[in-house]
Image: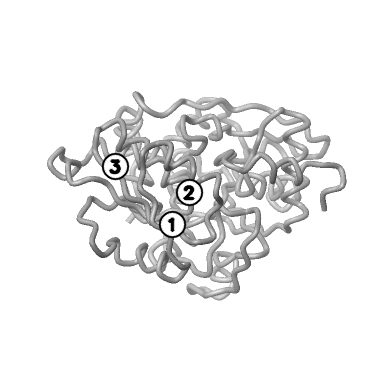
Amino acid sequence: MLITVEQVEEAQQNIAPIALRTPLVGCPAGSAVDLYLKLENLQPIGSFKIRGAANVTALTPRARLERGLLTASAGNMAQGVAYCARRLGVPATIVAPDTAPATKIRAVERLGGRVIQVPFEQWWHVFETRTYPGVDATFIHAFDDLDVMAGNGTIALELLEDLPHMEAVVIPWGGGGLACGIASILRELAPQVRIYAAEIETAAPLAASLAAGEPRTVAYTPSFVDGIGSKMVFASMFERARGLLDGSIVVSLEAAAKAMRLVAERNRVIMEGASACAVAAALSGRAGTGKIVAIVSGGNIDLDKFASLVAPCAP
């Protein structure tokens, strides 16, 4: 099932008190690509995830919210859920992988969220079961939820207002909620727009799954690109993606680091690794030429790590 324009228009009203309408800015990249950046790193939590979390909580009955909120997240949806929980005055429990960056964990704790770190396999199991032992709370899925995707789809409405003649959009692929949310609306309102996922070479299950025609499990290596990348694609998200996307562009760690430096230098914008993958993919030429939007999905990266990546001697 896909989201509808009507659902996204409703979400736009639901999230207006919480999420920003982020700017779309040009990036003078010095290439054949006329690159634009959708700056979701400027959201209150530094990530687009606030949109989905805000929409879900707006649609959830107060009686269910009173039980508290629960999510599984490496950092950004965790912050979105913790932020909404604090506004609502209810507790938030976050199950995070033990590979989650410390800077994101600290951000969740500053928002009042309780973080439980577990091994990767156990964390992924929480995604699948939508429960965690001993926690009786309302689960908000980071990506496989129509209301979350509707919140994310509001980005597409903003893009169509700001750049109606864009040729392509490149979107970081983590679980697929961002890509499928945006793509559902663009396919209905602007079917001529090319839509690509962006993945990192160290964890690119969507590209492998699209090539095979079915969900595949791939090797996973942790890296500074921590907002996207996993071992597998949910079957439900794969079915949506192959009907919505024109493909997945896989980039190297080196290309992502170079994209991070470029945007810092030209736009004075701090991007996290997932966002850098979208920019690197857009600049690779594999999304075509013309007006191409890269979704800067977030900017939550440890500053010391960021500094090392954008330094001239970085790989």
Q: Which residue is mark 2?
A: 75
Label 3 neighbour load within 10 Å: few <14, some 14-19, many 20+: many
Q: Are marks 2 and 1 in contact (CB under 8 Å)?
A: yes
Instruction: Kindly identify the amino acid type of the residue bearing the numbered disc 1.
Output: Ala
* Quadrant (top left/top right/bottom left/bottom right) for the N terminus: bottom left
Q: Which residue is mark 3?
A: 56
Residue depicted at x 40% and y 69% = 122
User: CA separation, marks 3 and 1?
Assistant: 20 Å
Instruction: Kindly identify the amino acid type of the residue bearing the numbered disc 3.
Output: Val
Q: Position of residue 48 (x, y in %)?
A: 48, 39
Disc 3 on helix, strand or loop?
helix
Please tell me in which quadrant of the rendered image residue 51 appears.
top left
Left or right, 6 with respect to 165, comes to left
Going from the N terminus, do you reach mark 2 or mark 3 first?
3
Disc 2 on helix, strand or loop?
loop
| Discs 2/3, front | 2
The residue nearer to you, when weighing 46 against 283, is 46
Q: Is residue 174 above or below residue 20?
A: below
Q: Which residue is mark 1?
A: 96
Residue depicted at x 73% and y 33% = 264
Instruction: Kindly identify the amino acid type of the residue bearing the numbered disc 2.
Output: Gly
Going from the N terminus, do you reach mark 3 or mark 1 first?
3
User: CA separation, marks 2 and 1?
Assistant: 7 Å
